[in-house]
Image (cartoon, grey):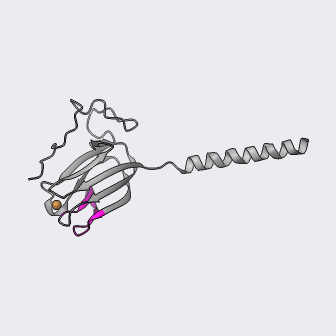
Amino acid sequence: MKRLATILFFAALAGSVLAATSAGGTAAPSALRGTVGPGFTIALVKGSSTVKTLRPGTYRITVSDRSAEHNFELQHGSSVRQLTSVAFTGTKTVTVRLTRGTWRIFCAPHASVMTQKFTVGAATSVAHDDRRGEPEPGDDRHGEPEPGDDHGGR
Ligand SMILES: [Cu+2]
């Protein structure tokens, strides 16, 4: 029976290696949700709260574009990435890498009213970095969601 025990031992070992490998490989990016339209509104949310600060990293943004008059773009400094076009309606998922700094999402034809800024990393604020995506401890004064925070739609 010694041989069987040896086989079992190696089988168990192989199993644990496989488990470790798959666990390491499935670190899924955090999910964010973007919406634009049908009115003059654009938003980037995480769970149920408007995104204001994020940790640097890879995120999967699912954009619901509900209007053929608006689009959804992501900007960091001078680099702009269009996630949905003006004509497009429907849902699209993109993976993005967010690095430290100030970012914004906006609708290109109506950028002055349809925009939302957020900060990745500590940046300039005295902030409590949000550790695991919990609601920010010191960021939000009253903890209420702020639907009309930015210069809202007309
Ligand atoms: Cu628009």
Quadrant occupied by the N terminus: top right
Q: Give the quarter the ligand 1 occupies.
A: bottom left
Foreground: 78 or 154?
Answer: 154
Does the segment drawn in magenta span residue 58? no
Magenta-colored span: 70-90
Name the spot of residue 130 as percent of width and height, x first.
Answer: 35, 36
Asked which quadrant contains residue 65, the reply is bottom left
Q: Which residue is found at the position 28% from the left and 58% from the top? A: 64
Q: Tell me where residue 8 appears, x and y as whole percent.
A: 80, 44
Q: Nearer the viewer, residue 94 or 103?
A: 94
Residue visible at 29% across and 46% down in the picture: 45
Residue 121 percent across, percent down from the top left: 34, 42
Whether 102 is drawn above or below 130: the answer is below
Q: Is residue 119 left or right of residue 9?
A: left
Residue 115 in the image: above or below residue 119? below
Name the spot of residue 47 as percent of width and height, x first: 33, 43
Residue shown at the point (43%, 50%) measured from the top left:
29
